[in-house]
Amino acid sequence: MNKTKIERLKAQGWEIGNTSDFLSLSREEMAFIDLKIALSKRLKELRLSQNISQESLAKKIKSSQSRIAKMEACDNSVSIDLILKTIFSLGGTNKDIMETIQSLSN
């Protein structure tokens, strides 16, 4: 959001914050959410780079297409464990995971 818009909103009595402020999340909760989002994005990148459909990936891991969609959308019903297992099923490595985690600090 640009500075002019922020100033205009503040002048009208609005408070400007972020997701953490709005949901009253702790630093740890925000870090967990950021990690899960990054892993979900990496999963989708790997799948697309291999031209694999959600349906084909679901069959590979004995799941459903809708479950793959939920993983890629970072649905709260999907565990990080399942996302990691699926990344590894696509040939992802520990190095891929570490690079994803390191990207969060940039």
Image: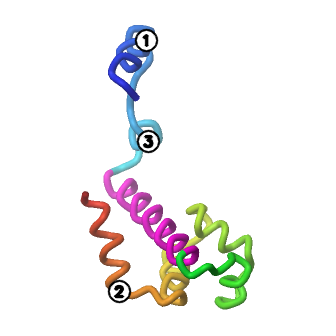
Find residue 26 and report its horizontal and vertical position in percent: 35, 50
Find residue 18 and report its horizontal and vertical position in percent: 40, 37
- The numbered mark, 1 or 3, whose residue comes first in the sequence reads 1
Q: Amino acid at mark 2?
A: Asn
Distance of label 2 from label 3 (alpha carbons)? 29 Å
- Residue, x 65% and y 66% (percent of image)? 70
Mark 2 against mark 3, which lies toward the viewer?
Answer: 2
For residue 106, above or below residue 14: below
Decide: few, some or many residues near mark 3? Use Cα within 10 Å; few <14, some 14-19, many ≥20: few
* Span colored in magenta: 27-48
Q: Secondary structure at mark 2?
A: helix
Q: Which mark is residue 13?
A: 1
Question: Mostly what secondary structure, the magenta segment?
Answer: helix
In the picture, measured across the screen, residue 45 lies left or right of residue 24, that is right
Image quarter of residue 58: bottom right
Q: Which residue is mark 2?
A: 94
Decide: few, some or many residues near mark 2? Use Cα within 10 Å; few <14, some 14-19, many ≥20: few
Q: Which residue is mark 3?
A: 19
